Amino acid sequence: MSSADAQEEKKYNATLLGLGVGLPYGGFGLKLTQQVHTNIDLFGGIGYNLIGPGYNVGMNLNIPTGLRTQFFFTGMYGYNAVIKIKNLEESEKAYYGFSLGTGLRLSPKKYKWSYWDFAILIPFRNQSFKDDQDFYYRSPIVDDFNKAFPLLFSVGYNFQISAEK
């Protein structure tokens, strides 16, 4: 492939569909990604977050490497915490806010427009979540309550569903 072909190839505005786990996928779910620039993607994810539907919308800034491995930075808004306590349905609640992170894309050699993505995310959780978490952590009626981990992870497989020049 000539360098002119490589330049031409980068002009595609690809649409990708992903299946995965984590905030970008709405929990356990799907992510739709639209490439709006060579290095910028917009995405929306919807899935199941252990108590009901979860969603996130955001943007990825891709760092080109010229290799099958590519780094990215991500920012999103949507659910970033859930409280669910067994046998205490009134505790079930999803909390919304911003999350930032970084990740790695691995493209299989065989499939040019598909990739695995792995990300580490920092959720910025609101005061309502912190108050509820502290309440249930100290509550004598709740056994074995674990506080939320300050970092989250996501993994998913994404494949192209359309592209236009």
Image (tube, rainbow, N blue to C red):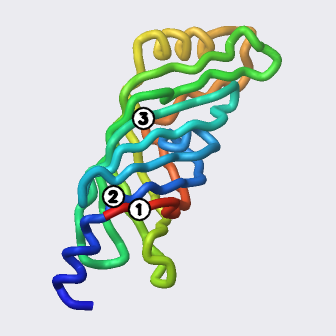
Residue at 39% from the left image edge and 29% from the top image edge:
77
Return the mark for residue 13: 2
Type of amino acid under label 2:
Asn
User: Residue 136: image x %, image y %?
Assistant: 62, 13
**For discs 1 and 3, the disc positioned in front in the rendered view:** 1
User: Residue 21: image x %, image y %?
Assistant: 59, 48
Label 2–label 1 contact, CB within 8 A: yes
Cα separation between marks 1 and 3: 21 Å
Q: Is residue 137 left or right of residue 23?
A: right
Q: Is residue 143 left or right of residue 161?
A: right
Residue at 69% from the left image edge and 25% from the top image edge:
51
Element under disc 1:
loop
Residue at 33% from the left image edge and 58% from the top image edge:
13
> Residue 46: which quarter of the image?
top right
Give 143 or 80, whichever is nearer the viewer. 80
Q: Residue furthest front?
A: 165
On screen, 136 above or below 118? above
Give 59 or 14, whichever is nearer the viewer. 14
Q: Residue furthest right?
A: 87
Residue at 30% from the left image edge and 62% from the top image edge:
71
Label 2–label 3 contact, CB within 8 A: no
Q: Which residue does the numbered mark 3 point to in the structure image?
A: 57
> Residue 100: which quarter of the image?
top left
Give 156 or 18, whichever is nearer the viewer. 18
For label 2, the crowd category at 10 Å Cα-Cα, with few meaning under 14, some 14 to 19 and many 20 or more, is some
Q: Which label's residue is closer to the chain start, 2 or 3?
A: 2
Say which quadrant the C terminus sits in: bottom left
Q: Which residue does the numbered mark 1 point to in the structure image?
A: 163
Type of amino acid under label 3:
Val
